[in-house]
Image (tube, rainbow, N blue to C red):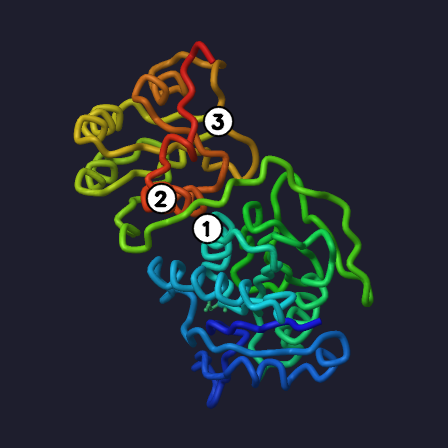
């Protein structure tokens, strides 16, 4: 079995020279060389895609990464793919790939919170776990995230801790599987998997605003989205907003900018028919908001992909009170 390690940068590929200046410098073959036991479980190939902190990874690069993964998928000698990346935006890039990649070869994203110059770096164990994850039959055709011996669906996972190695979680429903010793123990298969969409990479835009609603927030935060291609809004609770931002949202609708709403709560979804006060989910529906059941950053990725694929209506529902 051959697994290709595609390296994009991040802490897993970083070295710290004099303290406090960790930056991505290691190649994919350096990462593999640090885990000699990898060769015992698979034939390893390497591919250097980029070497950047993930906060510098662009939407354009996400599109190019999907192309790269499709090329690897079409090579019959490749049985699994592991993408190493910085953890900061990994939940966004892995979800972008999840939406756009339609290969059968499993793709597993991973990274590290502790760079290789620190005591107990977590990159080597994460790399080993990711290669094992590609070998699970349940992984076929999936885009997964393996971290700290847990395997998550790319659609569900989020980074929950800024510094701790136990950072990736799938709120509400939990991981799909765990790694115990050399075994992948699978407990859950996601339902309602997203369809793969074909994106015209020239039509990708990052001009999508993402705003978290806060108590008594200034309407200027909404007005800033007037010139955007879409506004993603994480409303409070079950879909509630301060009335003072409603006129600004009406202007956004008037300007033809789609609004995609989600909840700012880490768990749960927007209500459809529970409240009718001014600024409730009824207001969102009257405004014609689309609904998302993802967190705000993943909602933005889905919006970018929906626009790039010209599949907005297919990728988002737009409930009304009668639904
Ligand atoms: N702290 C980040 C990481 O875990 C840096 C990055 O996302 O590139 O890799």
Q: Which of marks 1 and 3 precedes in the sequence?
A: 1
Using the image, tell me which numbered label, if any, was put on residue 309: 2
User: Which residue is drawn at the image coordinates 72% and 81% (left, top)?
Assistant: 39
* Residue 132 x/y as whole percent: 72, 66
Vertical arrangement, residue 245 with respect to residue 164, above or below: above
Quadrant in which residue 164 is drawn: bottom right
Determine whether, in the image, residue 88 is placed left or right of residue 118.
left
User: Which residue is drawn at the image coordinates 55% and 53% (left, top)?
Assistant: 160
Give yes or no for contact between labels 3 and 1 (Cβ–Cβ under 8 Å): no
Judging by the rendered image, the residue that carries numbered circle 3 is 270
User: Which residue is drawn at the image coordinates 37% and 30% (left, top)?
Assistant: 313
Q: Which of marks 2 and 3 precedes in the sequence?
A: 3
Give the structural element (helix, strand or loop) at label 3. loop
User: Which residue is drawn at the image coordinates 21% and 31% (left, top)?
Assistant: 256
The mark lying in front, picked from 3 and 1, is 1
How many other residues sit within 10 Å of disc 3, few (<14), some (14-19) or many (≥20)? Answer: many
Judging by the rendered image, the residue that carries numbered circle 1 is 100
In front of the other: 118 or 208: 208
């Amino acid at each position: 079995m051959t697994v290709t390690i595609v390296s994009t940068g991040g802490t897993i590929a970083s070295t710290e020279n004099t303290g406090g200046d960790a930056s991505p410098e290691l190649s994919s073959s350096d990462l593999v060389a640090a885990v000699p036991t990898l060769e015992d479980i698979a034939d390893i190939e390497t591919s250097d895609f980029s070497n950047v902190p993930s906060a510098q990874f662009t939407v354009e690069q996400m599109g190019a990464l999907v192309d790269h993964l499709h090329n690897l998928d079409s090579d019959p000698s490749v049985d699994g793919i592991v993408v190493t990346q910085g953890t900061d935006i990994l939940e966004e890039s892995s979800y972008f790939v999840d939406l756009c990649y339609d290969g059968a070869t499993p793709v597993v994203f991973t990274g590290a919170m502790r760079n290789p110059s620190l005591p107990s770096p977590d990159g080597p164990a994460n790399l080993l776990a990711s290669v094992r994850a590609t070998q699970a039959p349940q992984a076929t055709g999936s885009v997964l995230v393996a971290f700290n011996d847990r395997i998550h669906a790319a659609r569900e996972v989020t980074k929950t801790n800024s510094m701790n190695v136990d950072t990736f979680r799938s709120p509400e429903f939990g991981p799909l599987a765990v790694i115990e010793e050399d075994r992948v123990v699978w407990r859950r298969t996601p339902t309602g998997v997203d369809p793969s969409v074909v994106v015209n990479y020239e039509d990708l835009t990052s001009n999508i605003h993402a705003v978290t609603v806060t108590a008594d927030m200034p309407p200027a935060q909404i007005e800033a989205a007037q010139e955007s291609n879409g506004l993603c809004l994480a409303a409070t609770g079950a879909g509630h907003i301060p009335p003072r931002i409603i006129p600004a949202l009406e202007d956004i609708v008037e300007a033809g900018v789609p609004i995609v709403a989600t909840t700012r709560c880490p768990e749960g979804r927007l209500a459809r028919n529970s409240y009718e006060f001014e600024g409730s989910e009824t207001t969102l529906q009257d405004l014609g908001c689309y609904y998302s059941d993802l967190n705000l950053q993943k909602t933005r990725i889905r919006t970018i992909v929906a626009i790039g694929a010209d599949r907005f209506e297919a990728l988002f529902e737009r409930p009304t009170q009668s639904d």
